[in-house]
Image: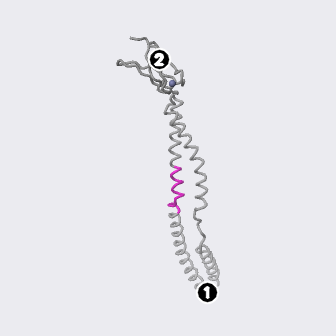
Amino acid sequence: MPDFVSLTCPGCGTRLTVPNEIERFACGSCGIELVVRRGGGIVSLAPAPTPELPAVPQEVLDGTAVELAVHRLQDEIPLLEKQVRSLTPEKGRGFSTPLFIIASMGLLVSIFLLMFHDLLLYSILGLAASGVIFFFGEKLLRKEDQKYRDKLDQFNQTEEVVRLNQKKQELAVYREKLRLFRSKATSE
Ligand SMILES: [Zn+2]
């Protein structure tokens, strides 16, 4: 058995004379690092494995990812909130409020007129008119409330509001994860 073997460099194809006692070397032609594999009666060359970097523990990766997510959400949410605020329907005053004011004034005037017995007819008419106005004011108020509630319902289903709520939930989840991660990190 000769004390060397002739092998081809897997990097550049140069024929190399490898002494039997050598296990790791660099190709003189291309400089690639090679390992000699012996087994089963054959000898071969393979590129030496590059030393692996120490693996970052998954927990550290997770913690960093969660922290990044929290920061991202904390930036995104105020922007969305601003957008949503500009879309929030305002509770319009409508006509019911002035109607109630007129009816109240009519009621006061009618009560005042009631103190003068000779103006009884006017006071009764005033009371009746105030009652009618109150009645319609109340109906109108209900209608306006319903309209506002409908608007709110519509608003709550807008893409922006839905997205904002999702992000808020996401943030809560990530914050909880981060809290758990930190408490675990400090207890170790
Ligand atoms: Zn080579």
Q: Quadrant of the N terminus?
A: top left
Secondary structure predominantly adopted by residues drawn in magenta = helix
Residue visible at 52% across and 71% down? Answer: 142
> Would you name the residue on which mark 1 appears?
122
Residue visible at 53% across and 38% down? Answer: 179
Looking at the rendered structure, the secondary structure element under dot 1 is helix
Amino acid type, residue under disc 2 in the picture: Thr
Q: Position of residue 140 (x, y in %)?
A: 54, 75
Q: Magenta stretch containing residue 83, yes or no?
A: no
The magenta span reads: 155-168
What's the CA distance linking mark 2 and mark 1?
127 Å
> Would you name the residue on which mark 2 appears?
17
Outermost front residue: 15
Reply above or below: 40 against 83: above
81 or 34, which lies in front? 34
- Looking at the rendered image, the disc whose residue lies closer to the viewer, 2 or 1, is 2
Q: Position of residue 64 (x, y in %)?
A: 55, 37
Check disc 1: other Cα within 10 Å, few if <14, some if 14-19, many if 20+. some
56 or 173, which lies in front? 56
Amino acid type, residue under disc 1 in the picture: Tyr
